[in-house]
Amino acid sequence: VVSAMCGVTDKLISIFNKYKSNDLLSAKEELLQLYQSHMKAFDKIDLKQKKCIQESKNLQSLFGELIVDLTVKRNYKSWDYDFVISFGERFAVQLLSCALSKLNVPSKYIDSSRLIITNNEFGNSKVLMKETKVKIEEVLFPMIMDGIVPVVTGFYGSTKDGRVATLGRGGSDYSATILAHALDAQEVILWKEVDGVFSHDPQKKGNGAKFLPQLTYAEAIKLAKNGAKIIHPHALDSMASKDIVVWVKNTFKPNLTGTKIWKGIA
Ligand code: ASP
Ligand code: MG
């Protein structure tokens, strides 16, 4: 499950708002920057070997699609915002797919609007579990059985009538645990930019933030609901019922253990 690159969702929100207020010049400038930063990341992964021609084409046509969408729509509905801000994940899956194919890992890119069905609370939608489970079993199980790694966009799904709906900021955690639940996974790893869960925000100095090596589901849900941005407030909702262990780990220090979220010692 792939989230957008750092800062990209914020940029997309800003671009959307600029289009809405007719600040087109500045919006286009930001779009260009976004395009360039993705191409730069892409070149780094592909190291000019041009192994990922398809993914590079996909990336370009996604930018084309986004620009057309922003240009054509002038009468914005609540769901237009969700569609625009979902592009960060669509871009990022191309990068991960390329990285995997360079490692000779057979993978396939799956758009989460095919898997995750949500209600109509655009911007902060909830997942409809029963409908979603059917889709995941239908699409993902056969792929996994064939040894193919599905690369799925985080952060959004679609409503029953097929509109892209986002799951709230940080929603890729929620996407990941929903998939884990539907697939009966034993564990989920949420890859972050910090070593795990802390008692206070570790990026703010001087608040005595203490690393928490383990938490029960209830303790972690309480932290998330009280505004700890590290975990999406709904990501852990379905984990306790299946005893799925959730790890919060640092992408940049994968050897560190991280924080374990589980039922705790009985
Ligand atoms: N890219 C989305 C956001 O910034 C989702 C996520 O990061 O999980 O909120
Ligand atoms: Mg993110």
Image (cartoon, rainbow, N blue to C red):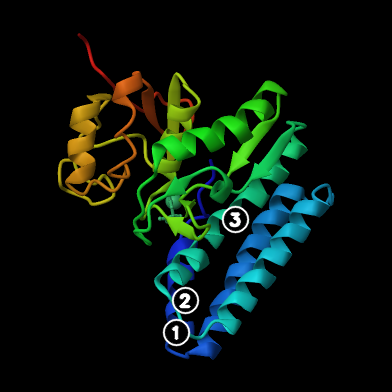
Q: Which residue is mark 3?
A: 90
Does the Cβ of the disc 2 residue fall within 8 Å of ligand 1? no
Local SS, label 3: helix
> What's the amino acid at mark 1?
Lys
Is the residue marked by circle 3 packed among few (<14), some (14-19), or many (20+) residues within 10 Å? many
In this picture, residue 180 sits left or right of residue 125: right
Where is residue 86 drawn, in percent x and y? 51, 60
Is 26 situated above or below 1?
below
The one nearer the camera, 241 or 218, is 241
Q: Is residue 91 left or right of residue 219?
A: right
Who's the residue at 25% across and 32% down the image?
A: 211
According to the image, label 2 marks what residue? 16
Identify the residue at horizontal 55%, vertical 37% (top origin): 135
| Tag 1–tag 3 contact (CB < 8 Å) | no
The answer to which image quadrant residue 63 occupies is bottom right
Q: Earlier in the sequence, mark 2 or mark 3?
A: 2
Q: Residue at x 20, y 8 (%)?
A: 266
Is the residue under label 3 in contact with that under label 2 (CB below 8 Å)?
Answer: no
- Residue receiving disc 1: 20
- How far apart in space, not on screen, are marks 1 and 3 (Cα)? 22 Å
Asked where in the image residue 14 lies, by quadrant, the reply is: bottom left
Between residue 263 and residue 230, name the one nearer to us. Answer: 263
Find numbered disc 1 in the image and state the secondary structure of the residue it sits on. helix
Circle 2 residues within 10 Å: few <14, some 14–19, many ≥20: many
Determine the residue positioned at 38% across, 61% down. 122
